[in-house]
Each structure stands twice: as C-alpha cells, then as structure tokens.
Amino acid sequence: SKSSCCLKMREPLECNFCFSTGGGLCTPTSTQICSRTQNACAAVIFQGALNCSFRQCMNMAVCQGYISTPGILASCCSSDLCN
C-alpha cells in the first residue's frame, strides 16, 4: 500500500538537543538527527538531587518509561523539533 511505502521512505526524525543542570528545562543548543530506533524527541527534567534536564532523540518506549517514573518530568513526541 501507499502508506507503508511512505513509512519506509520516511526521513529520520530530527530533535532539539541540550543538557543543563539547575532549574527548568534546558534551552536547545543544537539539533540531532535520530537513529532508526530513536523514534521520539524527548524533553526530560530530573527533579530532586540530580536536578538536571535534557532534550534529545530517544526511543518512544524509553521516553514513556520516564513519564511514569516519580521525580522525572518528561514529554515525548514524534515530529521534527517537537521537543
């Protein structure tokens, strides 16, 4: 079918990238092209003692795991630069 053809030909996902310590979510410093297994863009904040944040490519299942982890704020999305 046409739709499966388009999925195979899909360009790799592109995500914002950054890492910082301290409060809040880091401001994107660059972008990265995701590998085939990294099908999501993630924005993650570790609260508490770690108190750091990052934006990067990630596997959607891993990102969903962050969402359900106490002390971590995470959002996962699957369009270019959505994080």
Image (cartoon, helix red, strand yellow):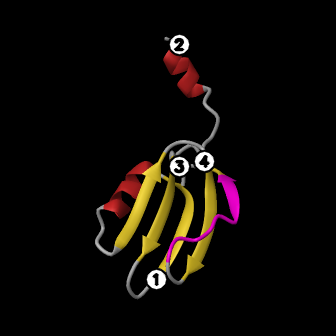
* Mark 1 burial class by Cα count in 10 Å: few <14, some 14-19, many 20+: some
Q: Secondary structure at mark 4?
A: loop
Mark 2 or mark 1: which comes first in sequence?
A: 2
- Separation of residues labelled 4 and 3 (CA atoms): 5 Å
**Residue 1 at what x, y percent from top left?**
49, 11
Residue at the top extreme, as displayed: 1
> Which circle, 2 or 4, is nearer the viewer?
2
Mark 2 or mark 4: which comes first in sequence?
A: 2
* Mark 2 burial class by Cα count in 10 Å: few <14, some 14-19, many 20+: few
Residue 38 is marked as 3
- Separation of residues labelled 2 and 4 (CA atoms): 24 Å
- The magenta stretch is 24-32
Residue 2 is marked as 2
Residue type pointed to by label 4: Ser
Q: Which residue corresponds to the image point at 54% horizontal and 26% vertical from the top-left?
A: 7
Quarter of the view holding residue 12: top right
Residue type pointed to by label 3: Gln
Residue type pointed to by label 2: Lys
Residue named by callout 1:
51
In the picture, the quarter occupied by the C terminus is bottom right
Mark 1 or mark 3: which comes first in sequence?
A: 3
Q: Secondary structure at mark 1?
A: loop
Is mark 2 in CB contact (under 8 Å) with mark 4?
no
Is mark 4 in CB contact (under 8 Å) with mark 3?
yes
- Separation of residues labelled 3 and 2 (CA atoms): 24 Å
- Separation of residues labelled 1 and 4 (CA atoms): 27 Å
- Separation of residues labelled 1 and 3 (CA atoms): 24 Å
> Which circle, 2 or 1, is nearer the viewer?
1
Residue named by callout 4:
35
